[in-house]
Image: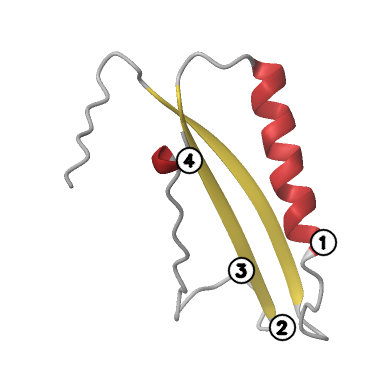
Amino acid sequence: SEFDIKSRAVKVESFQVGTSLSSRGFIAVKLSLLSGRSPQVKKQLSESLLAALQDLGDWPEGVQLQLSVELLDIDRDSYSKVAIG
């Protein structure tokens, strides 16, 4: 259900991309899913998220930007959660 979906954005104040001193940045999305989805479904999710990031546009001029998506499997058998309230 939609109640099971959680998201967060974390701004990293200090970072380095590569070794150059030129202006660079990154946006790294990590999507954690309960295990059991096929590689095809995970690939489709990854590609859809990357396309959505690219469509955000309005990227800063003169900044080399890397966008990435990583899907992580959560072991369904050992995952525990409780909703309170």
Question: Real-space Cα distance between discs 3 and 2?
Answer: 9 Å
Instruction: Give amino acid for label 1.
Output: Asp
Q: Which residue is rendered at x = 76% and y = 84% of the image?
A: 60
The answer to whether mark 2 and mark 1 are in CB contact below 8 A is no
Residue indicated by mark 2:
22
Give, as a three-letter code, the residue at label 2: Ser
Q: Nearer the viewer, mark 3 or mark 1?
A: 1
Confirm whether residue 18 shows in the render.
no
- Residue under label 1: 55
16 or 19, which lies in front? 16
Quarter-wise, where is residue 8 in the image? Answer: bottom left
Q: Determine whether the residue tagged by mark 1 lies in a helix, strand or loop.
A: helix
State the image coordinates of residue 56 (x, y, percent, origin top left): 77, 67
The kind of residue on which mark 3 rests is: Val
Choose the circle earlier in sequence order: 4 or 1: 4
Decide: is 44 above or below 9.
above
- Residue 20: horizontal and vertical position, in percent? 68, 76
Residue at image mark 3 = 17
Q: Residues within 10 Å of mark 1 (few under 14, many from 20)?
A: few
Residue lying at 68% horizontally and 34% vertically, measured from the top left: 45
Which SS class for mark 3?
loop
Residue type at tag 4: Glu
Location of residue 46 (image quadrant): top right
The dot on residue 2 is 4
Please determine whether, in this image, residue 22 is positioned above or below residue 42: below
* Sooner in the amino-acid sequence: mark 3 or mark 1: 3
